[in-house]
Structures are given as structure tokens and as C-alpha cells.
């Protein structure tokens, strides 16, 4: 159960590997902070926690949880907010249903997820689930724009200890494929609202017969808000996918599709489903009715399809024959036969594409061997970034992490900016007709003709966040002097509206000569040229590119995006400190459950902790918090300097070992400092004990590895079991408390 007190700093309860790590690290943080009178509370934004909070009516009093996400959503709007946010699951439907089944098995009376709701009751339950799945957390909490960059200590370490990079060949067949048109990029229209146009709008579908269906009503739009509408043609998508499958086979390379079905929880699962149907097209053509009767939903992935048809010999034979005739498939786990198309949440573009690029353009095939890959990214809004990166490295060879500069990011994301806020305003057209936005004054702002199955979406960016984003970019450029690029495409409708804000703001601030505006493809090339030369750049981007680039560049520069410093400067004065990407977390948990070894790297948490404590010291005038922050920074540097980060292999130091070293270096720094004698006296015996008991502690931690671990649940682990597994050193626990 989450802590509901009024702490100085809120630490989020999340999912998977980051949450396992918290069971080890948070007790250390609380113990050290308590010596300075700094309190840490928790709020549960995990997938299981959100499900439990959404369906309290059939639960016992002991099982019920408060809606911590809603409470945090209010907190981040205040000047007192100080939140350390770890990565949480942005759940796909398969993850959501798996979490529900686990909770039900634990005795929670949670309803099943209705995949095809029929009754009003089922539709109401589905609506409640839909508020949980996908990117349900980030739009609520991100009441500020993003400042993401590699911490100086992390960047220095990466240059001194460069990670392995795959070799790029100039004749590599790896390439990015996107639709030739009729996608979201090509069909986008946008406008900035005037005062007369503001007010509650609605989205309507108008059929060929003139009938009107309201898809969304009471959609609040305000003056100065950029409002977009666009659609992706289902027919054009199907034609494109069929051609790419054949082209991939002809080229003799691997087929892969890269989407973000977790964040884009309405549109991308549908696109993913089209890819599954295209891959198994002969099977769906012959057995479509039978498969529908079996509950097959291609949007849930091929793994779900196979599970539902496994007892039908004819369909299974057709599937095997079809797959045998297809090109090789990019694999998530070749050892276990998990393909690119198995689960929509398994291949997340901002993690999968950088990993492939870092590996020299190679993906893993079913035979466990690397191969060139057709990277299918249907929509052209951001595909040019990856296309240009692939072509750049073909021409120039792999980036050298030892000499590379860095790309920082200032991202527009506050108040559900851009596509990541489009979930309630994305629809699959039920028939041929038009979908339009009708404003409060009766004006039709946008109207687009659609055909049945087309994916239509609207998204917005509000004036205040845009202006705040531009100012944040100006401040960051002034502090660094780095090359600064607004990644905006004047030929894209949405970006053209943003440019109308950007240019006058830069002129008014007298800094127009300090910035350039480039479309994503050109900006990618310029940024890669800059860091290849050992210089630095700031990418000033919208919400999705913020997400994509703060994985792409760190993975190339540092080998991981989990070590990024991610500061959200909340618009009302508070601060939120994010701890890095969680895309690899499921693999880490799998290894931990099988081998008792957790390779999750808490470097992001270490960096966020220092920033959060510094923010507290500045905001509240808390000198002791500043001393804690300085000590935590020293400890982070120690982790890097002495190579105390987790190893990937069982039997070697893991996440828990790194926490021991972090505690030790932190205590030693606090004991040695002279800014606060009281803290120095408190931590001197702790530092001494941690050093003297090193052998005992490391032996106890090592003894916990090498055997399976029972957590009592994946999405909703048992607290006692989790704590026991992540705090196996009685000696360390006795010293820390």
C-alpha cells in the first residue's frame, strides 16, 4: 500500500525491474535522507495498482488502493511537487489482460477485459480499462516540459570506457521502409485556435447517407491551442505491407515492423494488427470466419493468434505453410521463438531501432544469427530520423563513443502535447464517410474523408506549454552555447503552426541567430555530423521525437538510455525527475526469476536522486539536503570510476551489489565533508561499518544468486517476498536499518 503522508519527495511505485531495484535502493535512500530530516513517500502508479484503484467495488477493504495517479496528477500542478518518477508499464492489451489474470488468481475480484464489448455493462468496463492501458501515466504527470541529457559523470565514463558498437558495411541491405503516401504525415491538417473558436468542441462521423454520429463531445479547446487532424489509409497500409513482405523476401533479409503500441495505444495496435494479417494473409483469407469465431484479434499479436487456433489442425497447418513461404523474421527471442509480430509491446520503436543501429544494422533471425533487416515504419512523421541514421552510418561507419559529442534534448510534452495525448481522440472509421472537428461556435475546423478501417486521430498542443518549451530551449542554449536545432518540418502541418510560435519568440528574445530550424531528416544528419566531430548539440523537439531521440542518441553514445538525466521542470514551479527508460525491464525480470540475478542499472535513479535533493535544497532552503545531494553525486561518480555497475551474467555483481557500493560511497562522502558536522558525525560509523563488513556483505549478496526466485507475482509481487529477494544481506540491512 502506498504511503499517503505529505513527504518532501515522492518516489513512485512502478513495475518490473525498476520496482525490484526500488526494494533494495529505497530503504537505503530513506535511511540516509532521514538523518537530514528529509522524508520520502511513495505513490503507486504501477499497472496492477492502477487496475486495483479503478475497480474498488468488489474488493475487500484490505485490497483497495487509493487512486495514486490522480493524486500525483494534482500534486505536479503545485509548486511543492518533488517527484522521482521511475519508468512504468505503458500497457498493451496482452499485458493488461495478463495483469488482470494475475490479480484474479491472487483473490482480487477484478472483471475480465472485454475485447469485444457487447452490452452496456461491458462497454462501461472497457472504458474504465481503456483509461489504464497505454500511456495512461505520463500525460497525467507531465505538467512540464522535458530537459534530458547525459549526466557529465556518465558521459565522461562512456568516453573513457566505450561500449561495443557493431560494424556498419557500406553495402548493408538494412533500410527503413515507409508508406509512399496516404499516411498520418501526408494527410495532416492543423490550425491554431482564435478566441472565437475556443470552447467545448466535438468530433463527428458523417456517413455517406448524411447520418451523423458523435464520437467525442465536450472536448475542451482553448485559445492559442494548435489542433491537428489526420488519418492513415487502411487500404494503403495493407498494400504497402504486402509489397514490403515480398520485397524483403526478394532481398533475402529479415522483416521487422517498429511501432509504439504502448504509448500510441489506439492507433499502433491497429497498425500492428494489419501487419499480423498481412503476414498471415493466406490464412485469414481461407479461415477468417473460423478464426473470428475462435476470438482471434490480430491486434493482440501472432502469439495470441497461435494460442487461440492451436487446437485447429487445419489452421495450424496453414499457418506453418504460410510462415515457411515468408522471408526471415526479426526475432525478439530466437531461443524461444518469439517473433517481431508476437506481442505488440515487445518491439518498441524507440528501443528497437537504436539497438539495431548500434549493432551495425543487424537484427536477430530465427536461426539465432544476425542479419540485415527491412525496418518497416509505416508512417512518415518520424521514420526519416531512423532512415537518415541508417544511411549516415552506411556512409560513415559506426559512431565512436570514445570521441563522440552528445545530443541533449528539450522536449515539448506538457499537458498532453501532440500525439501522445491523442488516445481519447483516435478512432477507427466504422464505414466510409468523413470525420470532422466541430468547434463550439459551430465552425467545422477540420474535415477529412475516410474509408472503413482508416485510422483517424486528432491531437493538440496548448499555447502555454509551447511558450514554456521555447523559453526552456533559450535557457538551455544560453547555459551551454551548444548548437541548437528546432526539429520542425515546415512541410508538416503541425510543425508549421509551431514555427509560427518559435520564430517570433526567438526574435523577441534577440536570440534568433543562436538557433536553426530543420526538418527531422536534416536535423538528424546535422546532429550526427556534430557529435561525430566531438561537438555537442541540443535537439529541441516535440513529444514523440523527445521520446525517440532520448533513446537513440544515448544508446549510441552511452550504450543505454537508462543512465539519462531527465528533468521535468513543472510549469507551476515543482520538479519531476525521471530515471530513464524501462524498455529492457521485462528481460531483466525474466533473468532474475530464473537465475536470481538482476542486471537493471540504477544509474538513472542515482542521477535523479541528486537532482531531486538539490531541487529540495533550493526550493525549501534545506542546507542538509544540499549536502546529501553532493554526497549522492560523489557516490554516483564512485560507481562509475570503480566500475560498480551491474554485470549481465549470473554469479557476477548485480543490481544489489551496486546499491551496496552506492551506500558505501555516499556514506564515505558524507563522513568526509565539512559543510555539516552533524551529518559527518552521523555517517562516520556507517561508512566505517560498510567498509569493514565489505566481504561479509558481498558474500551474502553473491549467495542469493544462481537459483530461481519466487516473487509471488509479476505485475503484483508479494511485498515480503520482493523485499527478501532484493535485501538478502542481513549485514547490510543491519547497518542501514
Image (spheres, grey):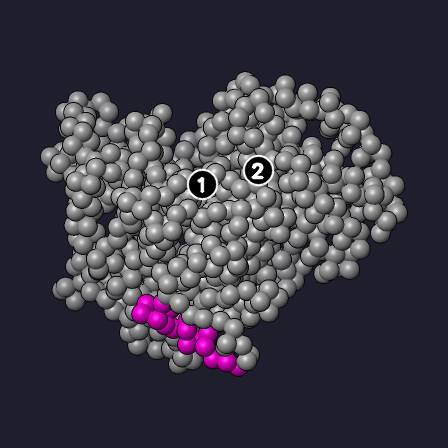
Number of callouts in the render?
2
Q: Secondary structure at mark 1?
A: loop
- Asked whether the beta carbons under mark 2 and mark 1 sit within 8 Å of each other, the answer is no
Q: Residue at x 16, y 40 (%)?
A: 250
Which residue occupies 20% across, 46% down? 244
Q: Is residue 491 magenta?
A: yes
Q: 466 or 52: which is nearer to us?
A: 466
Residue 275 at x, y = what percent? 24, 43
Q: Residue at x 55, y 64 (%)?
A: 482
Lateral position of residue 307 relative to residue 421, left or right: left
Quarter residue 30 falls in: top right
Using a 10 Å C-alpha cutoff, classify the residue at mark 1 as few (fewer than 14 neighbours), some (14 to 19) or many (20 or more).
some
Q: Position of residue 445 (x, y in %)?
A: 31, 73
Query: Which tag is nearer the camera, tag 2 or tag 1?
Result: 1
Please, what secondary structure does the residue beneath circle 2 have? loop
Residue 622, image x and y in percent? 78, 56
Closer to the chain start, of discs 2 and 1, is 1
Look at the image and say whether residue 387 sits in the magenta stretch.
no
Q: From this view, report whether residue 354 is shown above or below residue 320.
A: below
Magenta stretch, main secondary structure, is: helix
Picture layout, residue 633 above or below residue 652: below
Q: Nearer the viewer, residue 700 or 530?
A: 530
Label 2 to label 1: alpha-carbon separation: 19 Å
* Residue at image mark 1: 165
In this picture, residue 11 sits left or right of residue 175: right
Say which mark, if any, is on residue 699: none
The span shown in magenta is 489-508
Left/right of residue 343 with respect to residue 30 in the rendered view: left
What residue does disc 2 label? Answer: 601
Amino acid at each position: 500500500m502506498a504511503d499517503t503522508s505529505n513527504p518532501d519527495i515522492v518516489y513512485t511505485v512502478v513495475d518490473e525491474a525498476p520496482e525490484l531495484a526500488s526494494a533494495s535502493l529505497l530503504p537505503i535512500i530513506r535511511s540516509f535522507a532521514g538523518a537530514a530530516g528529509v522524508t520520502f513517500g511513495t505513490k503507486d502508479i504501477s499497472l496492477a495498482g492502477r487496475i486495483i484503484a479503478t475497480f474498488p467495488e468488489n474488493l475487500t477493504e484490505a485490497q483497495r488502493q487509493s487512486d495514486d495517479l490522480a493524486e500525483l496528477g494534482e500534486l505536479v500542478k503545485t509548486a511543492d511537487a518533488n517527484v522521482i518518477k521511475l519508468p512504468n508499464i505503458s500497457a498493451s492489451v496482452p499485458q493488461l489482460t495478463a495483469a488482470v489474470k494475475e490479480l484474479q488468481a491472487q483473490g482480487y475480484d477484478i472483471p475480465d477485459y472485454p475485447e469485444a464489448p457487447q452490452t452496456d455493462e461491458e462497454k462501461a468496463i472497457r472504458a474504465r480499462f481503456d483509461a489504464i492501458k497505454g500511456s495512461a501515466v505520463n500525460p497525467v504527470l507531465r505538467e512540464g516540459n522535458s530537459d534530458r541529457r547525459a549526466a557529465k559523470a556518465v558521459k565522461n565514463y562512456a568516453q573513457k570506457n566505450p561500449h561495443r558498437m557493431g560494424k556498419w558495411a557500406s553495402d548493408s541491405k538494412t533500410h527503413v521502409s515507409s508508406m509512399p503516401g496516404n499516411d498520418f504525415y501526408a494527410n495532416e491538417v492543423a490550425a491554431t485556435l482564435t478566441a472565437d473558436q475556443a470552447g467545448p468542441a466535438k468530433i463527428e462521423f458523417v456517413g455517406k447517407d448524411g447520418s451523423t454520429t458523435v464520437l467525442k463531445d465536450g472536448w475542451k479547446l482553448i485559445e492559442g491551442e494548435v489542433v491537428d487532424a489526420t488519418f492513415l489509409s487502411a487500404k494503403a497500409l495493407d498494400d504497402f505491407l504486402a509489397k514490403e513482405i515480398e520485397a524483403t523476401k526478394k532481398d533475402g533479409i529479415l522483416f521487422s515492423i517498429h511501432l509504439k503500441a504502448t504509448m500510441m495505444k489506439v492507433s499502433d495496435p491497429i497498425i500492428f494488427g494489419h501487419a499480423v494479417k498481412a503476414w498471415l494473409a493466406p490464412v485469414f483469407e481461407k479461415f477468417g470466419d473460423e478464426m473470428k469465431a475462435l476470438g482471434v484479434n490480430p491486434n493482440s499479436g501472432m502469439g495470441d493468434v497461435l494460442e487461440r487456433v492451436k487446437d485447429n489442425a487445419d489452421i495450424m497447418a496453414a499457418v506453418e505453410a504460410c510462415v515457411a513461404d515468408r522471408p526471415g523474421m526479426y526475432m525478439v527471442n530466437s531461443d524461444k521463438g518469439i517473433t517481431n509480430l508476437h506481442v505488440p509491446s515487445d518491439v518498441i520503436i524507440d528501443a528497437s531501432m537504436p539497438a539495431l543501429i548500434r549493432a551495425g544494422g543487424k537484427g536477430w533471425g530465427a536461426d539465432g544469427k544476425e542479419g540485415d533487416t527491412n525496418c518497416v515504419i509505416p508512417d512518415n512523421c518520424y521514420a526519416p530520423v531512423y532512415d537518415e541514421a541508417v544511411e549516415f552510418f552506411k556512409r560513415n561507419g559506426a559512431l565512436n563513443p570514445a570521441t563522440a559529442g552528445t545530443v541533449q534534448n528539450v522536449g515539448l510534452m506538457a499537458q498532453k502535447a501532440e500525439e501522445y495525448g491523442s488516445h481519447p481522440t483516435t478512432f477507427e472509421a466504422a464505414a466510409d464517410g468523413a470525420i470532422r472537428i466541430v468547434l463550439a461556435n459551430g465552425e467545422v475546423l477540420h474535415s477529412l474523408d475516410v474509408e472503413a478501417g482508416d485510422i483517424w486521430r486528432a491531437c493538440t498542443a496548448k499555447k502555454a506549454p509551447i511558450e514554456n518549451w521555447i523559453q526552456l530551449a533559450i535557457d538551455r542554449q544560453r547555459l551551454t552555447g551548444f548548437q541548437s536545432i528546432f526539429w520542425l518540418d515546415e512541410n508538416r502541418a503541425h510543425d508549421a503552426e509551431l514555427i509560427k510560435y518559435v520564430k517570433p519568440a526567438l526574435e523577441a528574445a534577440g536570440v534568433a541567430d543562436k538557433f536553426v530550424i530543420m526538418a527531422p531528416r536534416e536535423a538528424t544528419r546535422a546532429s550526427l555530423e556534430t557529435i561525430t566531430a566531438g561537438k555537442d548539440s541540443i535537439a529541441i523537439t516535440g513529444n514523440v521525437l523527445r521520446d525517440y531521440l532520448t533513446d537513440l542518441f544515448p544508446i549510441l553514445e552511452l550504450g543505454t538510455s537508462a543512465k539519462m538525466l531527465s528533468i521535468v521542470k513543472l510549469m507551476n514551479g515543482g520538479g519531476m525527475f525521471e530515471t530513464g527508460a524501462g524498455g529492457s525491464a521485462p528481460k531483466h525480470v525474466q533473468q532474475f526469476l530464473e537465475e536470481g540475478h538482476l542486471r537493471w542499472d540504477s544509474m538513472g535513479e542515482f542521477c535523479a536522486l541528486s537532482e531531486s535533493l538539490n531541487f529540495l535544497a533550493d526550493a525549501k532552503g534545506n542546507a542538509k539536503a544540499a549536502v546529501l545531494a553532493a554526497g549522492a553525486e560523489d557516490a554516483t561518480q564512485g560507481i562509475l570510476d570503480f566500475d560498480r555497475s551491474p554485470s549481465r551474467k549470473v554469479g557476477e555483481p548485480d543490481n544489489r551489489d551496486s546499491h551496496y557500493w552506492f551506500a558505501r560511497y555516499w556514506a564515505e562522502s558524507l563522513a568526509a565533508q565539512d559543510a555539516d558536522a552533524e551529518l559527518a558525525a552521523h555517517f562516520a560509523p556507517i561508512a566505517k561499518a560498510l567498509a569493514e563488513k565489505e566481504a561479509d556483505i558481498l558474500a551474502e549478496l553473491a549467495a542469493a544468486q544462481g537459483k530461481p526466485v519466487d516473487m509471488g507475482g509479476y505485475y503484483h509481487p508479494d511485498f515480503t517476498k520482493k523485499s527478501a529477494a532484493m535485501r538478502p544481506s542481513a549485514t547490510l540491512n543491519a547497518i542501514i536499518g
